[in-house]
Amino acid sequence: MAHALGARKLFSELSLTLRPGESVAVTGPSGSGKSTLLSCVLGLIRPSAGSVKVTGTEIVGLRPARLAAVRSRAVGMVFQFGELLPELSPLDNVVLAALLARSDRQGARDRAQKLLDDLGVPQAATSEELSGGERQRTAVARALINEPALLLADEPTGALDTETRDRTAELLFGLPRRYACGLLVVTHDPGVAARADRMLRLEAGVLKPVSSGASA
Ligand SMILES: Nc1ncnc2c1ncn2[C@@H]1O[C@H](COP(=O)(O)OP(=O)(O)OP(=O)(O)O)[C@@H](O)[C@H]1O
Ligand SMILES: [Mg+2]
């Protein structure tokens, strides 16, 4: 895949394959295109050339309705912050994602409650009442509710203290084995990246393997 912004080439001949159960961390300087790469995989940005396949389906050039269907069925995304609806309960935040993917209401509620219990999120009237770490775990539950084959996370621990960061990272990197999904994490934190099965670095338009132990 390749992506350019005007005359500026963000990356070219970039190739990445994730297997079920595998985790990959992408590091790289600010502005190198890491978030853009995730947006291409999510289908929010169309790469200027090349192909993006999600569970075998080519998503580049799909009609918006088909794309939305593939995305809600197969991909979960954890943003850095701000993606929960603050006035809804944690449960309703998670249920909403399932309803958007056309799940039946009672099944969605049961699955959402089980995920939140699994992830240790307490009951709350609104997600505003939760701590930062609890919100992040709610966001993880929301990303998992449709049992995605692929989970994407953009700096999921960026706003957390070290203890919550470690707990969230532990949780995230345990997900591929627990739910048999692929996990693609963008992070600036070398300690978080080191937990992945594979570490890659995006720099000057090229995605290269990083050997563990090298600085990120
Ligand atoms: N919609 C856009 N229009 C024009 N330029 C953009 C757009 N989105 C991103 N860019 C530019 O593309 C480059 C890559 O942005 P991107 O957000 O992918 O970087 P990043 O590697 O995620 O950086 P960071 O580590 O700071 O989050 C940046 O130089 C950014 O300014
Ligand atoms: Mg970014």
Image (cartoon, rainbow, N blue to C red):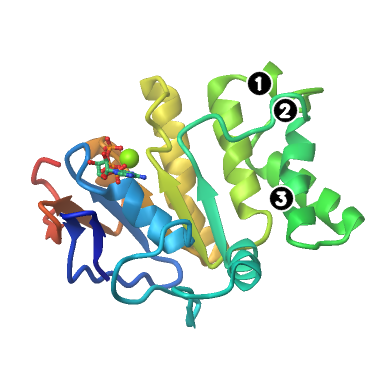
Q: Which mark, by number, is residue 97?
A: 3
Q: Is mark 2 within 8 Å of ligand 2?
A: no
Q: Amino acid at mark 2?
A: Pro
Q: Mark 3 is on which residue type?
A: Ala
Name the quarter where the C terminus is drawn: top left
Q: Quadrant of the N terminus?
A: bottom left
Q: Which mark is residue 130?
A: 1
Taking the image as shown, residue 112 lies to the left or right of residue 83, namely right
**Label 3 C-beta lies within 8 Å of the nearest ligand 2 atom:** no
Percent x, y of residue 60: 44, 73
Do the numbered discs 2 and 1 sit on residues whose CB atoms are within 8 Å? yes
Can residue 148 be spotted in the picture?
yes
Q: Which type of secondary structure does the marked residue at label 3 adopt?
A: helix
Q: On the image, numbered disc 2 is attached to which residue?
A: 122
| Front residue (pair 32, 161) | 32
Q: Residue at x 41, y 39 (%)?
A: 169
SS at circle 2: loop
